[in-house]
């Protein structure tokens, strides 16, 4: 049983490192920006809630909600990616490449423009709902195509095309929408964690929290599904309803991220891959929490860089995630190719 | 064959196929507990379609499948998975899974909400791996193992599911002969020791005949024949099943021979006790027609010569060689341009062979070849 022991040690180390990174990034993220606040002071303010009004505002109104959102939504993206990879039995599936994020973005933009025009305000739940509808639309379309093109490249091309179409429609809408909030909308449609408040944190937290728990409790059938649909069925998985669960959950997670922060690329593919390598297993029961933490770390770090690298100019979050994520995905593809050639 | 003549699986008026269209019609078969049943038939005959319908991968077009007196569709996902396990033809490439992980997957129907294994489950995983001799590769990456190892691991996974009924779809494809025999002998002992009922499809008729209690021959859109291999299998049937008219199958030995060379026979081969067979095969490959004789009908060489020689000069077992056979042999000696003797033991009853050999020698046609089985053959050259 020494292998089991070795695995357990490995898992413990990976989780310890991830949690430590979350804390380091927490402090680092609050610490850096136009106004620097020292780590000691941060801890003091966080734990006592006392401090100068200016500092309190920066921490509680701007940096902390943004930070928590980056972590939570990053985790959600990684989970959505992992679920889609399970569904399509394809490591390169993810909400962004399959056009699911773009579909969500399109419907959100539609709803936003309509509501801002008529009502002047949109609730965040309405936006999540709109994003969910958009995500489901893209997903169903992908499912339809994957029926005719059941291979990896067919799926990808279809997803990328859907992504382009949806983005084109969104750009069109934004170009012709006449509102002062367009600047805001434009920033959002490129992906950004800026402008989050604690209300967003609470509503996103509920959705992501529930989706995470449901995903975690699916880890047993996900494990069986990794051996292929037919083996899963023979072991007692109700494949049909399981697939519906996967699609609903991954769409919900991707929709939630898109509604709050816009489309964010590569997290969904790169993070689950990295976590599986680090853990040296694909067992869902460890990969799911690890991917969530990994996604959180990845996005918190990316947001830190987006915020500070060219301050005061802020980068799109996808600019940073692509810069780190794309090379990981390329490495993954090459490594897969080499393995298959063995 | 079986002590308890209780039907375990019944296929009643079963129609199976795709999209509601039957590919194979009106299947009626009763299978007893602990039996090994093999589906045999040409490629694309629908063996897999039948198996896929039994494991509920395909919806049944019409009719019923009853397992343990309960209709297939009355089983819940869980109870069916505790009754039946499968080894499929599809090749799987699970990511980052050791062989042990793959086998442990078989405990799925018995573990809790999160699929954690308890010590008893762990013990069963080890037990299953031991029974297929896969314990030494337990911690190896599944994708890095050989085809034979993969197949054994998948079998162990199925055993871990503790099924009463095991379905295997062409478990021997991709395997070399050593692993084929190993896998089938594991199945054989499993069926007997644990009283597991096995239904599988196989490519190899010869192996199927040796392992099966019952064979089901599938051809066209129906079951062509069904029964104990010893009863139903003969050359005629196999040729009909596969639509072969240019190859021959000896069901007694399970050996497949290419058709005999045609044309005028110019060589006489004299042998006994199997010593002639390598020479027959060699001549067959060169498409040289030959006559074999004089062979007793209970000789090994006789069975092969029947399929490979243009003509067989034969005599009833344990009799003295009669005039008819003797004269025919003498004729052959004078007609043929070469007489190959692969060795023949002369005794009281076949004393007349000496005369045949002497005649060949005097005519300068005799060539003695020390086949000694297949050993001496390398140095042996065919006549031009």
Image (tube, coloured by chain):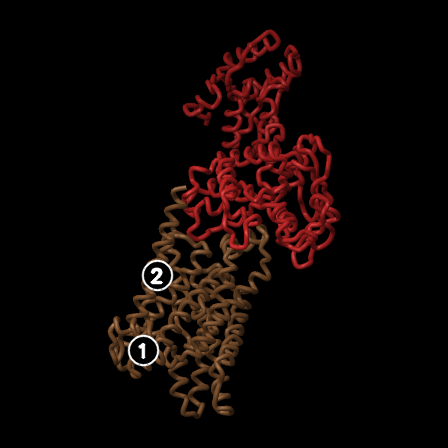
Q: Nearer the viewer, residue B56 or A147?
A: B56
Under circle 2, the secondary element is: helix
User: Dot 1 falls on which chain?
Assistant: A
Residue at the spot 51% in from the left edge and 67% down from the top edge: A249
**Circle 2 crowding by C-alpha within 10 Å: few under 14, some 14–19, many from 20:** many
A78 lies left or right of A323 = right
When the figure is inspected, residue A112 is found, relative to residue A145, above or below; the finding is below
Q: Colour of chain A?
A: brown
Q: Is residue B123 left or right of residue B323?
A: left
**Residue at (63, 35) in percent of width and height:** B195
- Residue A251: x and y, percent? 50, 70
Of B256 and B259, nearer the camera is B256
Q: Chain of mark 2?
A: A
Residue A158: give x, y in percent of width and height. 48, 69
Q: Earlier in the sequence, mark 1 or mark 2?
A: 2
- Which dot marks residue A18? 2
Identify the residue under disc 1.
A50
Q: Is residue B334 above or below residue B96?
A: above
Task: Characterize the local packing of mark 1: few (<14), some (14-19) or many (20 or more) Cα atoms within 10 angstroms.
Answer: few
Please report the residue visible at 52 percent of the width from the left and 59 percent of the height from the top. A218
Instruction: Return the x and y of residue A224 as percentages of the image width and height.
Output: 52, 53
Quadrant occupied by the N terminus of chain B: top right
- Relative side of B247 to B126, left or right: right
* Residue A165 in sight in this render: no
Can you say whether A207 is above or below B169 in the image?
Answer: below
- In the picture as drawn, the residue positioned furthest to the top comes out as B348
Q: Which chain is red?
A: B
For marks 1 and 2, give the CA distance: 29 Å
Q: Is residue B231 above or below residue B295?
A: below
> Closer to the observer: label 1 or label 2?
1
Is label 1 in a helix, a strand or a loop? Answer: loop
């Amino acid at each position: 049983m020494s292998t089991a022991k070795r695995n357990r040690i490995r898992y413990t180390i990976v989780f310890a490192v991830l949690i430590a990174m979350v804390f380091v990034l927490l402090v680092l993220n609050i610490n850096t920006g136009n106004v620097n606040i020292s780590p000691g002071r941060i801890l003091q303010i966080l734990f006592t809630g006392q401090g100068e009004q200016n500092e309190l505002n920066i921490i509680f109104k701007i940096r902390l909600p943004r930070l928590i959102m980056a972590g939570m939504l990053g985790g959600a993206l990684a989970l959505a990616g992992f679920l889609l990879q399970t569904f399509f039995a394809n490591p390169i599936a993810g909400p962004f490449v399959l056009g699911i994020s773009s579909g969500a973005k399109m419907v959100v933009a539609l709803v936003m423009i309509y509501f801002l025009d008529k009502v002047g305000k949109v609730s965040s739940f309405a936006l999540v709902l709109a994003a969910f509808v958009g995500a489901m639309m893209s997903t169903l379309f992908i499912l339809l195509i994957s029926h005719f093109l059941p291979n990896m490249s067919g799926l990808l091309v279809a997803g990328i095309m859907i992504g382009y179409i949806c983005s084109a429609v969104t750009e069109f809408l934004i170009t012709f929408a006449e509102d002062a909030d367009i600047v805001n909308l434009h920033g959002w449609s490129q992906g950004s964690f800026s402008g989050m408040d604690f209300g967003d944190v609470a509503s996103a937290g509920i959705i992501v929290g529930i989706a995470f728990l449901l995903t975690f409790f699916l880890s047993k059938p996900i494990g069986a599904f990794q051996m292929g649909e037919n083996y899963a069925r023979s072991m007692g998985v109700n494949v049909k309803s399981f697939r519906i669960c996967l699609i609903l959950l991954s769409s919900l997670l991707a929709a939630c991220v898109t509604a709050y922060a816009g489309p964010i690329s590569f997290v969904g593919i790169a993070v689950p891959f990295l976590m599986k390598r680090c853990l040296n297993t694909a067992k869902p029961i460890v990969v799911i929490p690890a991917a969530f933490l990994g996604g959180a770390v990845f996005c918190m770090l990316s947001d830190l860089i987006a915020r500070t690298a060219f301050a005061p100019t802020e980068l799109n979050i996808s600019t940073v995630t692509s810069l780190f994520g794309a090379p990981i995905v390329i490495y993954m593809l090459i490594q897969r190719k080499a393995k298959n050639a063995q | 064959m079986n002590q308890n003549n209780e039907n375990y699986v019944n296929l009643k008026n079963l129609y199976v196929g795709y999209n509601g269209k039957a590919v194979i019609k009106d299947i009626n078969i009763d299978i007893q507990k602990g039996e090994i049943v093999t589906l045999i038939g040409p490629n694309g005959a629908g063996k897999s379609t039948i198996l896929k319908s039994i494991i509920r991968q395909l919806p049944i077009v019409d009719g019923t499948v009853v397992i343990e007196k309960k209709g297939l569709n009355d089983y819940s996902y869980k109870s069916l998975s505790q009754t039946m396990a499968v080894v499929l033809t599809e090749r799987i490439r699970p990511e980052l899974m050791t062989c042990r992980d793959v086998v442990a997957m078989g405990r799925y129907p018995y573990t809790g909400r999160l699929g954690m294994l308890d010590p008893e489950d762990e013990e069963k995983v080890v037990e299953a791996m031991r029974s297929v001799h896969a314990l030494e590769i337990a911690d190896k990456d599944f994708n890095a193992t050989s085809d034979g190892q993969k197949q054994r691991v998948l079998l162990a996974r199925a055993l871990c599911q503790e099924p009463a009924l095991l379905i295997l779809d062409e478990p021997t494809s991709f395997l070399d002969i050593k692993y084929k025999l190993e896998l089938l002998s594991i199945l054989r002992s499993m069926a007997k020791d644990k009283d597991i009922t096995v239904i599988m499809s196989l490519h190899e008729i010869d192996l199927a005949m040796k392992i099966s209690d019952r064979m089901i021959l599938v051809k066209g859109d129906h079951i062509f024949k069904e029964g104990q291999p010893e009863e139903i299998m003969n050359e005629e049937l196999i040729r009909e099943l596969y639509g072969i008219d240019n190859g021959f199958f000896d069901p007694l030995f399970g050996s497949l021979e290419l058709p005999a060379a045609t044309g005028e026979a110019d060589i006489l081969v004299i042998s006994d006790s199997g010593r002639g067979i390598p020479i027959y095969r060699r001549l067959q490959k060169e498409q040289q027609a030959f006559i074999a004789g004089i062979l007793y009908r209970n000789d090994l060489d006789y069975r092969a010569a029947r399929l490979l020689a243009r003509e067989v000069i034969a005599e009833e077992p344990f009799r003295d060689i009669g005039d008819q056979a003797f004269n025919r042999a003498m004729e052959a000696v004078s007609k043929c341009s070469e007489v190959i003797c692969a060795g023949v033991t002369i005794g009281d009853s076949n004393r007349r062979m000496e005369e045949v050999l002497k005649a060949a020698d005097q005519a300068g046609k005799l060539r003695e070849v020390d086949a000694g089985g297949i050993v001496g053959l390398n140095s042996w050259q065919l006549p031009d």
